[in-house]
Every structure is written in C-alpha cells, then in structure tokens.
Amino acid sequence: MAAALKYPVLMVHGMGFRDRKRLCYWGRIPKTLKENGAEIFFGGQDSNGSVESNARQLESSLKKVLEQTGAEKVNIIAHSKGGLEARYLISTMGYGEKVASLTTLSTPHNGSLTVDKLLKFPDFAVRLGCKAVDLWFGILGDKCPDTYGAVNIFRTDMAEKFNAENPDDPRVYYQSYGFVMNSAASDLAMCIPWLVVNSIEGENDGLLAPRAVEWTNFKGVYRGSGRRGISHCDEVDMRRSRLPVISGDVSENDIICLYLDIINGLKSMGF
C-alpha cells in the first residue's frame, strides 16, 4: 500500500451521468487510487442540474465526507462541467477553507465557441428540447434537472461572467488538464460532435477544445500515444481498457497512470 494522501478525494462527475456503483462514471480509476493510498468519495450531484443547484448537492457531499473521515479538507478531482460546480462551491459558496486542491480535467472554464453558435437556434426550440431532456433525467433520478441552465454555462459570455464571479481562492491549489482526439475515428461515440467542434474550433476531445479548458496551473494537452487520441469519455476511463497517453515529455502506458501522477503530486505538496 502506498502512503496515504493527507486529505480524502472527492470525485465530481460531468454532465449527462450520475454516480452509480455498478456502472461507475470513473471506470477503473477509483479502485486504482484506493490501492495507492487515497480515500475516495463521490459528488453525487445531478446529471443535468445547473451549476448552482449541483454545487448545493456537492456541499452536502463535502460535509458528509468531512464528518465521516474527520478530515479538515478534501482534494477535489472534477471532470468537465463538474469542475465549474466545484469552483462555485469554493468561491461563491465560500468553501475554500475546506478544499485543499481542485484538479479539473476538460472543464469548460473559458466556454465553448461551438455552443455559442449552436445556441443561435431560436430560444423557444432550445428550451423545448432541454425540457424534454429534463423529463428523461428526472426519470433517471435527477432532483433538479435544468438542462437549459447547464448548457448555457458553456457559452463564452457566461463563462467570462462566471470567472469574474468565481475567482480562484488563494487557499486552494488549482490545476487543469486538456485532451484531444486525433480524428473523428478516434472514438465513434464522439465522432459527430468532434466533427462539429473541429469545424469551428479545431482539435478537440469530442466536446471541448484546449482553449476552452485551460485554467490555473495548466498541465498541458494530453494525446493518445497511438492513432486513437483521447476522447471526453476516455478521460474518465469509461471503456475500462488500457489507453496510453502522452503530453510533451510525459508519457504513460495507461490513462489511469495520469490519475496516479495527480495524487502523487498532491501527496508531494502535503495534501
């Protein structure tokens, strides 16, 4: 057993999924991190809630973790929109003193130029489509589904406003990661969205371009070392299969090794 992290890890999922025991959003990652000295907990927020609503749910999860473990703080690892919810929890809701670090992976900190264009469709049509999605996610268990609010936070103007209202808390260590697919064929599940984003913003992970996800202490853009690349789904090991990654001089033989690097880095900083 590797040396334990000082603080437990709260893993915060992205949009469109929930934390489930049988079909874990994070694939093999939680088990691997536990084997390497991390106490793992999950955010438990809605799939398609607004940032504000989901942050309130994260608040409840955070309090439970601190009560259960007796820890003073947590380390948060967040994917996609979950990173915005964690930032809102820290800044607007004032939980900076309870969070040691925030690691975001493909979080749309700077908004999406693609979403800007897509939301030029008539607003009534967008709202109608979002309401239909809300009904579905309500059936699946969301307490407060708000797909319209969730989608709009991806707009670049909303991201700018969000960033102004939720600056980094100096008590928290922030770091961010980006990823890209090599082509539309890298992940058939993300093929069509990759083509759309690529036509507007260039290289992307099937949803977000590197410019959208870069934030404090940006660790670079990770790519598959082979022809495949890394999709938005691959980033959280949804396929439960080995996927080599590379970024600059950093090369790993599996995506889960990147997460081991993350917790080992947090250990070295006393978190």
Image (spheres, helix red, strand yellow):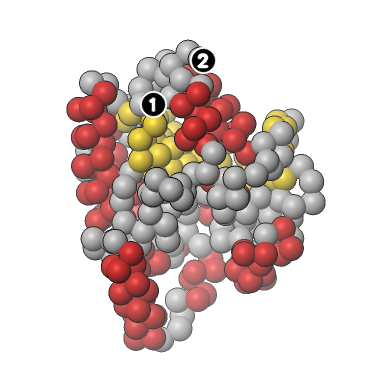
Quadrant in which the C terminus appears: top left
Residue 187 in the figure: left or right of residue 103: right
Numbered disc 2: secondary structure: loop
Numbered disc 1: secondary structure: loop
Residue 87, horizontal then vertical, whole percent: 34, 44
Residue 75, horizontal then vertical, whole percent: 38, 30
| Label at residue 191 | none
The amino acid type of the residue labelled 2 equals Ala
Residue on which the image places disc 2: 2
29 vs 57, nearest the viewer: 29
251 vs 23, nearest the viewer: 23
User: Looking at the picture, does residue 200 appear above or below residue 256?
Assistant: below
114 vs 11, nearest the viewer: 11
* Image point (51%, 22%), residue name: 36
Residue 203, horizontal then vertical, whole percent: 68, 58
* Image point (42%, 19%), residue name: 5
* Image point (40%, 66%), residue name: 151
User: Looking at the picture, does residue 132 appear above or below residue 183?
Assistant: below
Is there any visible trace of residue 84 in the rendered image? no
Of the image marks 2 and 1, the number of the one nearer the N terminus: 2
The amino acid type of the residue labelled 1 equals Glu
Is there any visible trace of residue 206 in the rendered image? yes
Q: Residues within 10 Å of mark 2 (few under 14, many from 20)?
A: few
| Label at residue 39 | 1
Q: Are marks 2 and 1 in contact (CB under 8 Å)?
A: no
